[in-house]
Amino acid sequence: MEGEVWRLITPTFMHSGFSHMLFNSFSLILFGPTLERMLGSGRFLFIYLFSGLAANVATLLFEPLTYTHVGSSGAIFGLFGYYIAIIIFRKSILSKQNSQIILVLCAVSLIMTFLQPDINVVAHLFGLLGGFLIGAIPYFNKKALAESFQTTTSWASSQRRNVSFQSPVKVLIFAVIIILAILGFWR
């Protein structure tokens, strides 16, 4: 608000401690490489930075001016948002199993956002929204959107009966994320 514009991006690269940095780095390592291979490094970096910027601008606008925050969570939630746009608008890019895992992890992350103390809820939500919008805008038209939501909901309802993890690696990854989330909740 006083011309220190860099504060809209620098929180994305700062963390409050080692465990905070470790959890965000783990999330980025888990979800970033596949998306970067799909999009290329330049587009991936743009989505990451745009989502982080959207999260920080929203924090500036919706939180008190004395509110301080750090972390790359808003940018990481932007990656989730972009993945969700892919799942809705470009189903053929991801397998159904990967789409299901991403949706479950995104839902767990959103739930934990509201359960953990000292979490910038605004940054998480607007990072998610920023990533989703970047992924959705190129494919937006009303007819395609309606058809996409219709096929997504029918697919999701059919998957409720078949929820299973196909690979021990997926179970391990999911378990580690849940354990880290619980440990973060009890700190």
Image (cartoon, helix red, strand yellow):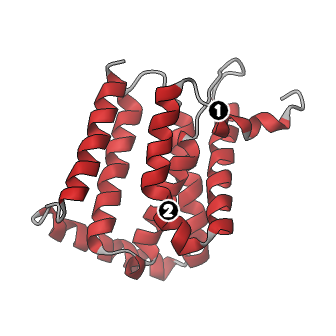
CA–CA distance between discs 1 and 2? 21 Å
x, y percentage for residue 111? 34, 38
Spot the residue most to the right: 3
Q: Which residue is mark 1?
A: 14
Query: As rendered, which of 122 and 72 lies closer to the eye?
Result: 72
* Circle 1 SS class: loop
- Foreground of the two, 22 or 185: 22
- Going 47% across and 52% down the picture, which residue do you hit? 29
x and y percent of residue 41 in the render? 64, 67
Using the image as rendered, state which of residue 127 and residue 27 is in the foreground.
27
Classify 173 as above or below 68. Answer: below
Rendered view: 60 above or below 131: above
Residue topped by disc 2:
33
**Residue at coordinates 46% horizontally, 81% vertically from top-left?**
144
> Label 1: few (<14), some or many (≥20) within 10 Å?
some
Dot 2 amino acid type: Pro
Q: Quadrant of residue 94?
A: bottom left
Q: Quadrant of residue 140?
A: bottom right
Q: Residue at x 59, y 30 (%)?
A: 15
Describe the element under mark 2 as helix, strand or loop. helix
User: Is mark 1 in CB contact (under 8 Å) with mark 2?
Assistant: no
Among the two numbered marks 1 and 2 on one chain, the one whose residue lies closer to the N terminus:
1
The residue type indicated by label 1 comes to: Met
